[in-house]
Image (cartoon, rainbow, N blue to C red):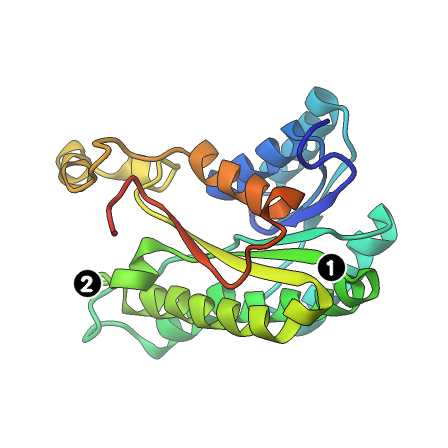
Amino acid sequence: MKLLEGKVILVTGASKGIGNGIARRCAENGAQVAFTYLSSVEKGLALEKELTDAYKIKAKGYRSDASGTNAAEELINQVVTDFGSLDALVNNAGITQDNLIMRMTEEMWDKVMEVNLKSCFNTVKASIRTFMKQRSGSIINMTSVVGIRGNAGQANYAASKAGIIGFTKSVAQELGSRNIRCNAIAPGFIVTEMTQALNDETVKTWIEGIPLKRSGTTTDVADCVVFLASDMSSYITGQVIQVNGGMLM
């Protein structure tokens, strides 16, 4: 039996990057996959078809911006209607708007907080009723190594990802008695469309600081998601699991 067989997983921001890898790995492990996309419409539609055809599971993409409270509620309600249940929520959607703090505008700060942190609050709150009714559920919030150690030029991003850690631990304490788990994953240097745009010297510098001496892949992160969404992690909650090759210890 596959680890996620019979489970319904919702992954936000899955049209590309880490979210795309998570959706694929969950489908490979037998899950029915709901996912969101926003600007990358063609990629979202292509992923829906690919997951359905390649893994013979039910998959559906939703064009949704979970940073809006009403949109998040509509999304969760529609997923439960379409799939019949929701077993795991993966909050992956996020953006960066980098700049030094002296040059960072209020709009840049607010937008990153809204998309990265507020969206987590919105989707978790909208999912609670379903999880409580089932007396089960796994919430997986994507934070970052930057949310743990900070990074120059990313004060807004680092703050949003650090906020996700505090939010995750609080949710775990509030909902644990209902058998609802909440954990966070902190990826390190992962190869995605974003990191592929970096020059070779920058990549070399990052890798030199990683004990395993390689960058991570979306599959490395996705495997951790599969574990946390599965029954194998039934006694794990309130944790931040670092997937970073030993970059931070």
Residue name at image x 69 percent, y 21 percent:
54
Going from N to C along the chain, the mark reached first, 2 or 1, is 1
Q: Which type of secondary structure does the marked residue at label 2 adopt? A: loop
Indicate whether 97 appears above or below 186. Answer: below
Residue 23 locus on image (x, y percent): 60, 38
Residue corresponding to mark 2? 152
Left/right of residue 175 with respect to residue 239 in the rendered view = right
Residue name at image x 46 percent, y 67 percent:
164
Residue closer to the observer: 32 or 63:
32
Residue closer to the observer: 142 or 66:
142
Residue 230 locus on image (x, y percent): 64, 43
Residue 64 position by quadrant = bottom right
Residue name at image x 32 percent, y 46 percent:
188
Indicate whether 138 appears above or below 104. Answer: above
Residue corresponding to mark 1? 75
Residue name at image x 52 percent, y 58 percent:
183
Query: Alpha-carbon neighbours of circle 1 within 10 Å: few (<14), some, or many (≥20)?
Result: many
The numbered disc on residue 6 is none
Q: Amino acid at mark 2?
A: Ala
Residue closer to the observer: 151 or 166:
166
Residue 135 position by quadrant = bottom right
Q: Amino acid at mark 1?
A: Leu
